Amino acid sequence: MSSTLVRHITPVLPDRARGVVAEVYAQVNAEFSTIGPAVMMMSPSPELMAAGWSLMRESQLAGDVPALEKTLVALGAAQANDLDYDIQAFLAVLRLLGEARLADTVERGDPPADPRHAALLDWAASTGVAAREPLRPPFAAGPEAAEFFGTVLFTHFLDRVAAAMLPAGLTPGTLGPDDEPPFDGAPVLRPLDQDLRPGATLPLLDGLPTAPPPSWAADRPIGTAYAALAATAAQGAGLLTPEAANVTAQVIAEHRGRLLPAGDLLDQPLESLTPDERAGARVAILAGLAPQAITDEHVAAWRATDRRFSDHCTVFLLAYGAMTAVTHIEADLTA
């Protein structure tokens, strides 16, 4: 696969992967899909890749909630992020689950006929955007809620990083093994009826920073994975000066991590920073609140401020901004 399908970094190709990256690729390939650009974009940072895959797998793939319901939640979050790559991916998953009529209905913009399906999709689509107040969750607290919350929060994280790192207009195709792929290396979905044991990804988190799992996770591995991803991504603040990190945290908190039109979002908040500080704070804030607005020039300007900045650093800074936003979304959804 050409690295031009991932912006800002050179991804680790599957045949060159070693260590944790190779382990993650092997698990993703066995339990979810072949290795497409949305997986490879995280590969310069094995730490973030492991924690992100753990949260996705433990919430969206393992557990007891039907795959159809979690797919609708992920699709709703992708709609909230307006990320066509993921919207098309989850519509394809619906079709591979035998729900072509439901996928067509959603694609037309109509509500699903099943009230449960409609409520889950609408709830997820109401999360993480400034234009809407999040709806009340259409499910009770407990293990079921952990899977839904983990799915929606991971999708917000992944979609914000993907909006910054994948080329505009890229879509994954049908995900079906017998269909013509839209590009070399387009992902192919693995069987959706696998009975996956919860917790199998936790060894990948050994040695990563962590924190107490959130109460909504109901003592499931989902909570361990979420805490590891949040704590690991938070280390990206170290790529900024304390002043720039403070401004970044304040701006994202002011908007509760909700997506905004870019506009003049950063004109006033960055005034107190030096030009070099502004470059990094701009990338981090946009990653959290307006990732589609990040340009090649934004990332290049930040990397030019320190020759030590690498692809590993780039993934970390984008993940830091994205996950800082997600922690505010999480706090509001689970209050």
Image (tube, helix red, strand yellow):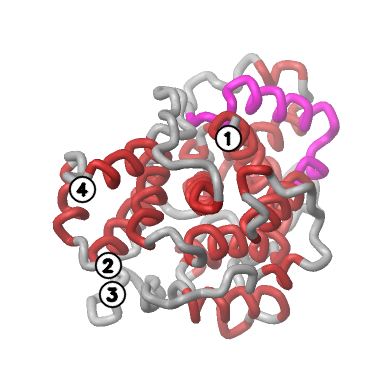
Mark toward the start of the polypeptide (1 vs 4): 4
Q: Is residue 204 above or below residue 70?
A: below
Q: Amino acid at mark 2?
A: Leu
Residue on which the image places disc 1: 334
Q: Amino acid at mark 4?
A: Glu
Look at the numbered disc 3 and give the secondary structure of its residue: loop
Residue depicted at x 17% and y 40%: 110
Q: Given this view, does label 1 or label 3 mark the residue nearer the observer?
A: 1
The span from disc 4 to disc 2 (Cα, nearest Å) is 16 Å
Q: Callout 1 environment at 10 Å: few (<14), some (14 to 19), or many (20+)?
A: some
Q: Amino acid at mark 3?
A: Gly
Residue on which the image places disc 4: 107
Look at the numbered disc 1 and give the secondary structure of its residue: loop
Q: Amino acid at mark 1?
A: Thr
Image x and y of residue 42, in percent:
60, 61
Can residue 247 be seen by looking at this rendering? Answer: yes
Residue on which the image places disc 2: 97
The span from disc 3 to disc 2 (Cα, nearest Å) is 11 Å
Look at the numbered disc 2 and give the secondary structure of its residue: loop
Image x and y of residue 156, in percent:
51, 44
